[in-house]
Image (tube, rainbow, N blue to C red):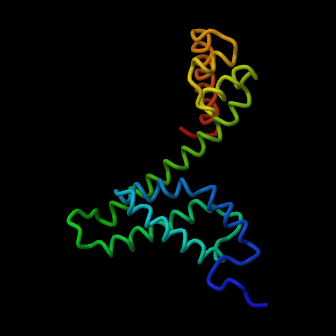
Amino acid sequence: MADPLPGRAPADRVDEFVRLLAQNQRRLFVYVHTLVPHRDDADEVLQNTNLVLWREFGSFEPGTNFAAWACRVALNQVLAWRKKRQRDRLQFSDEFLAVVAAETEDAADALEEQNRALAGCLEKLPAEQRELVRLRYTEGGSIEAVAATARRTVVATYRALSRARHTLHDCVTRTLAREGHP
């Protein structure tokens, strides 16, 4: 039977495409926005990138790095967008953009490693500290609200969160060093 979606992701891989794109959409936007200074232009380039990713997903090798593949597609879309905008006065060279793109990709990879290490370190915190961190940073609660929920004074809550942040920092630093990340 012919592919019902010619020129698009194979029908049996649509869910995989949607999952991978959703997991990487913010990273792709940040990547594009570092190369395209105005948000509206970055949104336009990202939309074009998403369309190309959809069309070309059949050529994506499962199990390889989707984010790296998507960033290469995004860089090509940035370069195509720039060609259309040649009449603008200020233009960065393609070489400059390539360097910024590479550094952005490296920084995103480092941030991903830090987030992974942080998630592991959060699991190692005692339950009480983990709950304070969750209330403060995941729920976005004020110190006063966290203190009230935890039935602590504001000062005690500040101290407990400070200890938790220090413990997390040390754990993340050790984890990354052990894995060979600076």
Residue 141 coordinates in the image, percent (x, y): 59, 27
Q: Is residue 165 above or below residue 68?
A: above
* Marker count (numbered): 0
Q: Is residue 142 left or right of residue 122?
A: left
Q: Is residue 80 left or right of residue 62?
A: left
Where is residue 5, by image quadrant? bottom right
Q: Is residue 160 left or right of residue 34?
A: right
Q: Is residue 23 above or below residue 152?
A: below
Residue 107 coordinates in the image, percent (x, y): 49, 47
Residue at the image position 59 percent from the left and 77 percent from the top: 55
Residue at the image position 64 percent from the left and 72 percent from the top: 60
User: In the orientation shown, which residue stands out farthest toward the left?
Assistant: 89
Where is residue 161, by image quadrant? top right
Q: Is residue 139 above or below residue 43?
A: above
User: In the orientation shown, which residue stands out farthest toward the bottom?
Assistant: 1
Residue at the image position 79 percent from the left and 90 percent from the top: 1
Where is residue 160, by image quadrant? top right
Q: Is residue 130 left or right of residue 144?
A: right
User: In the orientation shown, which residue stands out farthest toward the right?
Assistant: 1
Residue 119 coordinates in the image, percent (x, y): 67, 36
Q: Is residue 30 above or below residue 18?
A: above
Residue 49 coordinates in the image, percent (x, y): 50, 69
